Amino acid sequence: MIYLAKGKRSIVYLIKGKLVKKISKEWNIKNEVNWLKLLNKHNIGPKLISLDSNSLTEEYIKGERIDDFLKKSNEKQIKIVLKDVFKQCYKLDKLKVNKFELTNPYKHIIIQNLKPIMIDFERCKFSLKPKNISQFVEFILKLNLFEVDKNKIRNLVKEYKKDYSLKSYRKILRSLYLS
């Protein structure tokens, strides 16, 4: 095992260059496992491999953090990735899952061959009013990637949060030039 990182709740190791082992420090690892089991069915997150009493093993996502990707990529690549992240956020919202870290997702979205993969689901919670789209919109607006009407987009997000409809979701994508 090769040491990769130490977070607030776990220590992360790389195994054979293909797997990640997260060893719990103080949190209930079963929460992340339960969310990964559900979200893997919807093609979200790294593939869960196994669980034992204080650790989980999952697929290693080799790539670059979203903020590094956005700094060096062209507009076409950025739009491909952002559209996919929004698709995943919409799925999370429809599943009533609140991921939380999407206002500042620099450590929580890894880009691998133009495919964004969300990681770290230990803080996920069920919510009747999930905020994945709204949090990620705020992240995008802070970056000033595109010339957009921020107030209009924020109003579209408010509309979206009333019913989480596909129609209002698509309006947000259009306003960000992602559809």
Image (cartoon, rainbow, N blue to C red):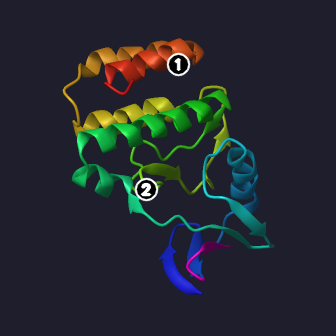
Task: Classify the position of the C terminus by image quarter.
Answer: top left
Q: Is residue 83 above or below residue 69?
A: above
Residue 161: tell me if it is visible: yes
Question: Position of 81 compared to 70: left or right?
Answer: right
Q: Could you say which is closer to the camera, residue 156 or residue 44?
A: 44
Q: Amino acid at mark 1?
A: Lys
**Which residue is at a point 56% across and 17% down the rendered structure image?**
166
The numbered mark at residue 161 is 1
Q: How far from the left and from the top, in percent, is residue 106?
A: 38, 54
Q: Is residue 28 visible?
A: no
Q: Which residues are magenta?
A: 16-24
* In the image: residue 176, left or right of residue 60: left
> Is 12 covered by the magenta stretch?
no
Q: Nearer the viewer, mark 2 or mark 1?
A: 2
Residue at 38% in and 58% down: 65
Residue 88 vs 158, above or below: the answer is below
Q: From the image, which quarter does the N terminus lie in?
A: bottom right
Mark 1: secondary structure = helix
From the top left corner, tell me how far across and down residue 36 is, in percent. 69, 53
Q: Quadrant of residue 98?
A: top right
Locate residue 101, reporting x and y percent: 48, 47
> Where does the image place residue 103, in percent across and percent down from the top left?
41, 42
Residue beneath disc 2: 113
Q: Is residue 23 magenta?
A: yes
Callout 2 secondary element = loop
State how far apart marks 2 and 1 are (Cα): 31 Å
Residue type for callout 2? Asn
Label for residue 107?
none
Q: Which residue occupies the foreground of this view, 34 or 68?
A: 68
Name the main secondary structure of what is drawn in magenta: strand
Name the residue rendered at 53%, 67% in the picture: 8
